[in-house]
Image (cartoon, helix red, strand yellow):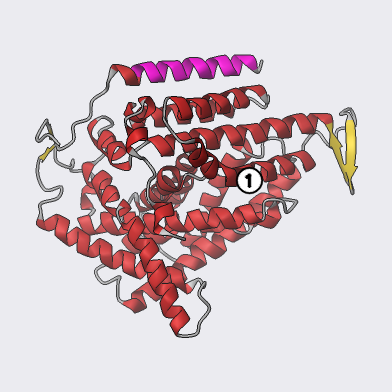
């Protein structure tokens, strides 16, 4: 595991793109609305439409490089296939004598209805991870936290405490390398559950030092001023409205 | 960057006001560590993707529920289960990008389910029985969510088997795992000033 893989991958081109300038809360809202919409249909068409819309808008309106997007999504294809396979082999339709049998796998009967449902669920996962990939590659953690505090009125102590903790992510990768090196020197197996204890010890020590430093600077003790103001823009309303129209259209297609 | 565009009110005096900065940072950092662990664990889970029936991969599920038990066991304040699980999930959604925004929904359900069990004890009882109940509640939440979103067409028999395997995995990883981790952390001397 390298530190580079864990650091948010939002470059200047993505940040300044149309989707990058859209408020992360709007994108999160869209992602959750689409997620719930996807949960309403087993048809294969709506998730495919939503996946294609997400990927194309990520590439065109989000300026994400195709290779980066592909690299993000590739491992998820495997998971989508695995879950689709479970739905295929153990479908509620398979024991139904009225369902059309296609083939048998050992003792398991596989029906046409099961194939349709498995395709729908596999496509659903592809849609979910496509939306997630585009969200992650165009959204900045700091802007999300700023928006949560200023626009969603989340407690600033919890929100900025979380943001401070996020900064520990690259350190954790370094800590892990150090701990593995120490184990190697002692002739121990490099990967062991005890590594987790070492990581937690270092992370908690870091958190305590950080909290002392933050308290010393008056964190959360009085009225806050805002360093990076965030406001809703017409772009947020437009992107949100378009996304809702696309969701409704995709769901109608599945009827 | 511009300065002082508007003033935010100070943290409101709710029951969360009892959270010290230290509690917030330590809970968040536990969430962050497990966010990274989740990221590794997603690949462990994916490595078993083609084992069927899927319960053969569900034995690893409990790892995703650990922060919802570990953080409240250390911090012992209302909201710790939900907060830690949401921070861990947000790492997946924001930095690791495995399951996308669904990790936030899953994290909310899993954290809230454990939170309800701790709330039912008034955040006063921390026996292995309570921890196990919280872990199982979290697994039940995850199981219901997965049935709806991912295994919608799977037969009831396999769903029931999944629930059993996920519940056992949760008790193993989240309840007993948290107790073992807290014991090691206390020995390392990092839990001074915490109730655990």
Q: Is residue A29 left or right of residue B42?
A: left
Q: Chain of mark 1?
A: A
Residue A245 falls inside the magenta stretch:
yes
Counting from the top left corner in percent of width and height, residue A172 is at 37, 62
Q: Which corner quadrant of the image does residue A62 belong to?
A: top left
* A216 up-or-down from A113: above or below: below
- Residue at image position (50%, 75%) is A190
Nearer the observer, A171 or A252 = A171
Counting from the top left corner in percent of width and height, residue B16 is at 25, 47
Counting from the top left corner in percent of width and height, residue A127 is at 57, 32
- Residue at image position (73%, 43%) is A85
* A54 up-or-down from B30: above or below: above
Q: Which corner quadrant of the image does residue A225 belong to?
A: top left
* B96 up-or-down from A63: above or below: below
Q: Secondary structure at mark 1?
A: helix
- Residue at image position (38%, 27%) is A19
User: Is residue B196 visible to the viewer in this orientation of the structure?
Assistant: no
Nearer the observer, B143 or A171 = A171
Please report the bounds of the magenta region as a residue range.
A237-253
Q: Is residue B68 left or right of residue B9?
A: right
Q: Is residue B7 left or right of residue B177?
A: left
Using a 10 Å C-alpha cutoff, classify the residue at mark 1 as few (fewer than 14 neighbours), some (14 to 19) or many (20 or more).
Answer: many
Q: Which corner quadrant of the image does residue A149 belong to?
A: top left
Residue A103 falls inside the magenta stretch:
no
User: Is residue A126 visible to the viewer in this orientation of the structure?
Assistant: yes
| Main secondary-structure element of the magenta-colored stretch | helix
Counting from the top left corner in percent of width and height, residue B3 is at 10, 35
Q: Quadrant of the N terminus of chain B?
A: top left
Query: Mark 1 sits on what residue?
Result: A79
Which residue lies most toward the bottom here? A186
């Amino acid at each position: 595991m390298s530190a580079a893989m864990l650091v948010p991958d939002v470059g200047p081109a993505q940040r300044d793109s149309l989707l990058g300038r859209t408020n992360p809360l709007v994108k999160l809202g869209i992602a959750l609305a689409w997620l719930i919409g996807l949960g309403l249909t087993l048809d294969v068409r709506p998730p495919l439409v939503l996946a294609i819309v997400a990927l194309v808008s990520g590439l065109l309106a989000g300026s994400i490089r195709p290779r980066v997007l592909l690299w993000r999504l590739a491992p998820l294809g495997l998971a989508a296939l695995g879950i689709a396979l479970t739905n295929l082999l153990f479908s509620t339709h398979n024991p139904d004598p009225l369902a059309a049998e296609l083939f048998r796998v050992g003792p398991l009967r596989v029906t046409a209805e099961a194939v349709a449902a498995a395709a729908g669920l596999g496509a659903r996962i592809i849609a979910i991870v496509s939306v997630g990939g585009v969200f992650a590659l165009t959204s900045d953690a700091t802007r999300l936290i700023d928006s949560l505090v200023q626009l969603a009125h989340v407690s600033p102590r919890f929100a900025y405490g979380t943001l401070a903790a996020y900064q520990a992510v690259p350190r954790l990768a370094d800590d892990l390398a150090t701990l593995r090196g120490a184990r190697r020197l002692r002739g121990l197996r490099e990967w062991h559950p005890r590594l987790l204890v070492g990581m937690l010890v270092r992370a908690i020590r870091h958190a305590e030092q950080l909290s002392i430093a933050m308290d010393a600077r008056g964190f959360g003790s009085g009225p806050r001023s805002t360093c990076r103001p965030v406001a809703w823009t017409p772009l947020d309303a437009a992107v949100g409205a378009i996304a809702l129209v696309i969701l409704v259209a995709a769901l109608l297609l599945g009827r | 960057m511009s300065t002082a565009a508007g003033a935010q009110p100070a943290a409101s005096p709710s029951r969360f006001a009892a959270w010290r900065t230290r509690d917030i940072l330590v809970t968040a950092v536990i969430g962050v560590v497990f966010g990274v662990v989740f990221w590794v664990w997603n690949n462990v889970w994916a490595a078993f993707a083609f084992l069927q029936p899927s319960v053969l991969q569900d034995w690893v599920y409990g790892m995703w529920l650990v922060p919802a038990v570990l953080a409240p066991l250390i911090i012992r304040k209302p909201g710790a289960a939900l907060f830690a699980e949401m921070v861990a999930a947000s790492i997946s959604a924001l930095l690791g990008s495995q399951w996308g925004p669904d990790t936030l929904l899953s994290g909310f359900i899993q954290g809230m389910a454990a939170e309800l069990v701790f709330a039912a004890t008034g955040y006063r009882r921390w026996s292995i029985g309570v921890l196990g109940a919280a872990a199982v509640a979290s697994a039940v939440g995850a199981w219901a969510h997965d049935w709806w979103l991912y295994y919608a067409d799977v037969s009831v028999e396999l769903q029931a088997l999944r629930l059993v395997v996920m519940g056992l995995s949760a008790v193993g990883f989240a309840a007993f795992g948290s107790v073992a981790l807290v014991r090691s952390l206390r020995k390392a001397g990092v839990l001074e000033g915490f109730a655990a």
